[in-house]
Every structure is written in structure tokens, then in C-alpha cells.
Image: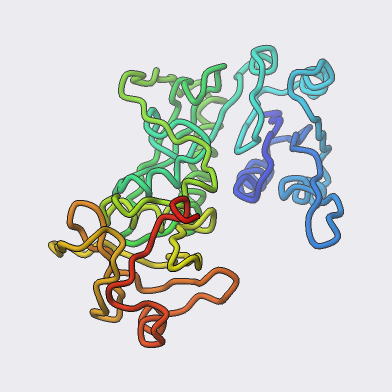
Amino acid sequence: MNVVFLGTPEVAVPFLQAVHDAGHRVPLVITNPDRPAGRDRRPGPTPVKRLAEKLELPVFQPRSARRPAFLEQVLGSRPDILVVVAYGRILPRAVLDAAPHGAVNVHFSLLPLYRGAAPVQWALVRGETVTGVTTMKLDEGMDEGDVLMQSELPILPGEHAPSLFHRLVQAGVPLLGKTLSGMEQGRLVPRPQDHPVATYAPIITRQDGEPNLSLPAARLEGMVRGFDPWPGVWLSRKGTRLRLRQAHAVARATHQSPNGTVLGLEDEAVHLACGGGTVLAVTVLQPEGKRQMAARDAFNGRQLVPGDILEAVGDVD
């Protein structure tokens, strides 16, 4: 098939490579414009552009998907299908209809769960134990198109977002290949989503990584895992910001202290009082501007002391 590929970040690169390696013709790769990067802030290519140039594929980098030139470029490539992986822009109806097979999107959740910009992160934050990858027909709604294929994946205990992203990509690449083959052969029947049970995964902000200690420990654990590498989970001790790098909720542990209280050191972890009487075991932390360190070393060095109360960053004047 003639495949116009739309994608921008590193996560989209293996999908473009797989489409190319499967023997599909790629007459056009569409990605975002070059952006300043590095210390000198010189414009640099997107990861997808770098691969496209390596494969000697034509590249188009429009600033808007709604200008006439965008549609003209797509139509001029005579695509059989559009493949969209983390492109980063909403496509208008005319573009979605520009290919006989429409536009196929790879989404890193089991739709209709976790529609939106950050499905992997929010699945971890909310304590899910299972997630997956979906290929779907794009429409003008936010991840509301008909499902083509899905692959379910367990979330490993203690897994952080980078690891889960990697495994989802590994599952998603062959799923896209099967989807394209099925569509080319007319074997796939799109299945409407169950819209009433949809959940959402909004764009993450810096403030999402500045929690209140009234949250239960399990939720804070999910944030530490889901907001890695950005924005991280930050608390404050006497005006000094601390990032929680590794932490887990302690099963069946309870406390009667104010939320945020450092309870002590146990099993190589600093125990922290959280909402609902729950306890968070912090094993790795990082003072702002310094290297990460074992929490036990911070405790033994009296950077954390029993009775200290850690605060939400937003609560500190």
C-alpha cells in the first residue's frame, strides 16, 4: 500500500521503520517543524524526520494541518492509507478522507479507556494493572474512532512510564503491521467504541507533579511511576524541594501522624505518612539540583529526620 506516515517523537520512529521494512511504499512523511534544541538552541529535526532522511523518504513539515497546502501534499502523494503515530496535531475531516482506507492511529491504551494525550502516564497514576495498544480509525473526535485491533499488556509491579512505553511500542509495532495487512485484504471490521465507559488522560502539567500529602500512598506511588521522567513528584522540606524517585505503598501499614510526617527508616526505606492513614516507603530521592540518592543515606545523613513534615510544593510560601 501507499502509506503517508504522520508522526513526530521518538516513540513513532519504530512504527515508521516497520512500515518501510514491511515493503509498503511511503511517498510522504509528515512531521512537526524543526525545534530549537541543545545549549546553542539551534533548530533540530524531529526523531521521525531523522529516520525519514536516513531512509531517503520525502518529508513535509507544516506548521498547521488546516492550511490548503497540507491537504494538497497528502492528495498529491496518492495514499491508500494514512498512518498516524503521535503526530501532535488534529487532522481535519478533508485530510482524514484523503485516502481510500482513511487514517489509522496507534493509541497506547485499550480504548475507550484513557483517551487523550497521556494514556501511559495516567494508567500508572491511577493504579491500573492492565493496559494495551489500540489501532483505530481516526475521526474528528478525541480518540473516539472505531477500533480495528487491540493487544492487551499487563503492567508490571513497580513499573515506571519509560519501561511501560517501551513494552507498548514493542507490542504496537506488530499490531500495526497486522492492521495494515488486514485492511489491505479487507478482513478487518471496525468496531465502535463503548463511549459511555470512556475515561480520559489529559495533558500533564508541572503542577501535576506537586501533590498534596492528603492523597493515599497508593496514589502517590502511581504518580512517582507515571510522572517519570517528567514532571516528577516533588515535595518540600523546610523550603528545599525533594523529588521522590522510587517509592511504594506499604501494605497494611497505618499511622496516626499528620500527613507528610517522616515516620522513620525501615527496610532501607524512609516511611512517610500519607492520607487515610496509609504509608509510603521512599527508597530513592533527589534534592533539587543534586544527584539522586538512596533515601536511607538521606536519613542517616539527617537530611530527613523523624518528625519532619514534608509539604506540597504549592503550599510553601
Q: Residue at x 49, y 57 (%)?
A: 232
Measuring from the top left, give residue 170's x and y in whole percent: 50, 52
Q: Could you tell me residue 44's position as x and y percent?
A: 82, 51
Percent coordinates x, y for residue 106 in the rendering? 53, 35
Front residue of this view, candidates 294 and 129? 294
Closer to the camera, 89 or 26?
A: 89
Q: Position of residue 72 (x, y in %)?
A: 82, 18
Image quarter in which the N terminus is found: top right
Query: Measured along the vertical axis of the image, is residue 212 above or below residue 101?
Result: below
Residue at horizontal 62 percent and vertical 32 percent from the top: 84
Q: Name which residue lies at 31% across and 24% down.
A: 197
State how many labels appear. 0
| Residue situated in front as seen by the camera: 82 or 130 | 130
- Residue ID at (19%, 51%): 276
Above or below, 88 relative to 64: below
Describe residue 86's horizontal placement relative to residue 77 as left or right.
Answer: left
- Quarter-wise, where is residue 269 in the image? bottom left
